[in-house]
Amino acid sequence: MSDFKDKVIYQIYTKSFRDSNGDGLGDIRGTIEKLDYLKSLGVDYIWMTPFFKSPLNDNGYDISDYLSIDPVFGSMEDVEELIAQADRRGMGLMFDMVFNHTSTEHEWFQRALAGEKKYQNYYIFRDGSPDAPPTNWESKFGGSAWAWVPALGKWYLHLFDKTQADLNWDNPQVREELKNVLRFWKKKGVKGFRFDVVNLISKPAIFEDDDSGDGRRFYTDGPHVHEYLKELVADAGIGDMVTVGEMSSTSLDNCIRYTNPGEHELSMVFSFHHLKVDYKGGDKWALQPPDFAKLKDIFTKWQIGMQETGGWNALFWCNHDQPRAVSRFGDDKRYWKESAKMLATCIHLLRGTPYIFQGEELGMTNAGYTSISQYRDVESLNYYQIMLQNGTSEAEALEILRQRSRDNGRTPMQWSGAPNAGFSDGTPWIMPPDNFKTINVQMEEQDEDSILNYYKTLIRLRKENPVISDGQIEFLCEDHAGVFAYRRFLDGDELFVYNNLTGKEIVLTDAAWAVHGKKLIGNYEGIQDESNHLVLRPYESIAYRP
């Protein structure tokens, strides 16, 4: 297994990173333009969201050809140059593999529709009648998880959109096809893979109705998922590469197995439980303030559980499906800089591999849109109409989207104060927030106290201090709901980390020793010592050695 513990990974949402040809869409050549920026940041791997051939019904997560590049993003020659140029700068490319399903435009599915039995067995078809789906399972995107094909007299399973047909992993031919995809890209020089919703690939032998849910209990972390992952990794020859699995509704016990080196499955996993602590009643569209006590409990459970078993976490706040962390868990107005740095400290000094989503290192905020016409995300547009139909006022519906829409993470990367934030010379497919004139790469590179330079320091510290990359962890201040604190330790070296998650001053009477320690990093100047207690100012973070 590749050494990844001191590495940092940067996620690029290609469509919004940098447009090189003025058509308003980010592209591969735009990414090549910005490799020196990523090198200066200090990242080791670049995770690219899918740019393969696709009808783009789900922004590229509906792939119609795993071995071709969609022309809106560039060409195979562009991708080969990207891999080579990144490699010259000491960075590896991590490609996004969507192996639970394909687009219904994929040649395999089209041949299945044409009646070829071989390819019908590539997917999950079931005989039936048009008024009786095989089960009552619900799609993750709403409605039935089954779609009827009149010409065949069959239903096919789609856990996501009806244009995303689930693959039949029980078919050895399917598994071999997917191994060949990995072999192809490894030969091209790709250094890592991210596997989309990979814990959903193994379906039950018998399909039955779910009388207590939407069906997920039958296929989440399914019956053969560990067996199939071991086979995929071993046979495709990617056991020496960095791999991360996106895990939907998963459990700690399964993620321990996915990432324990002795299991030979994945390097690390994404889990999302910590990003639901502001869902009222578990509903994404019902707003409530973040429950920081619950957030701390989740982090503690996963950190300690992985540590005790040799498992490994992917550490993150943001991605292309999430609102911006500084707007969600911090204060993007009065304490914008302090809370953005504090949230970075929380994640980067934990045990695991940190991920940075484009613009997070600048403190990019939610979009702040005021009209439904500014949104592009199909989920947001659909749910806006549902809210209005259910009696929600237009103002309330827009406020919910302002906080929850996936478009918050998809606005253009803010390179400068030039028109369109320096993202494009044309009209961007989605507009940047109005604050791009003050929050951008150009300005923050020139400011020693910027969020960008703080991220550079955090990345450097991980590489210089084995206690961060390899140390053990124990949690402190567990009775203080607003303080996220922990101790990292390795071979006699210790690092204490304190983060104030709130906009209020907090006095810690049980951390008096800390004021005498050597500060490693913090988002305020100096250490405030009052009555020999540790006083954490609003959104203060500080890490130091005793």
Image: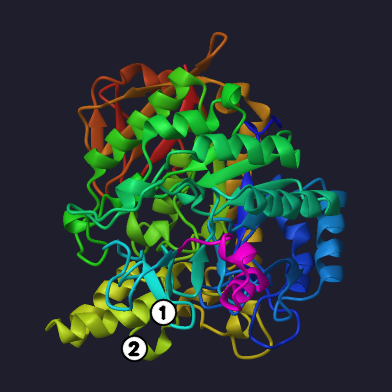
The residue located at (55%, 34%) in the rendering is 227
The residue located at (28%, 34%) in the rendering is 297
Q: Is residue 224 left or right of residue 244?
A: left
381 or 115: which is nearer to us?
115
Q: Secondary structure at mark 1?
A: helix
Q: Secondary structure at mark 2?
A: loop
Q: Which residue is mark 2?
A: 371
Mark 2 and 1 residues: CB-CB less than 8 Å, in contact?
no
- What amino acid is found at the position of numbered circle 1 in the picture? Val
Q: Which residue is mark 1?
A: 378
416 falls in the magenta region: no
> Above or below — where is 194 with respect to 221?
below
Magenta-highlighted residues: 107-125
Tell which circle, 2 or 1, labels the residue nearer the N-terminal end: 2
Q: Is residue 48 left or right of residue 141?
A: right
Q: Is residue 26 left or right of residue 222?
A: right
> Above or below — where is 151 with respect to 294?
below
Horizontal and vertical percent position of residue 311? 50, 27
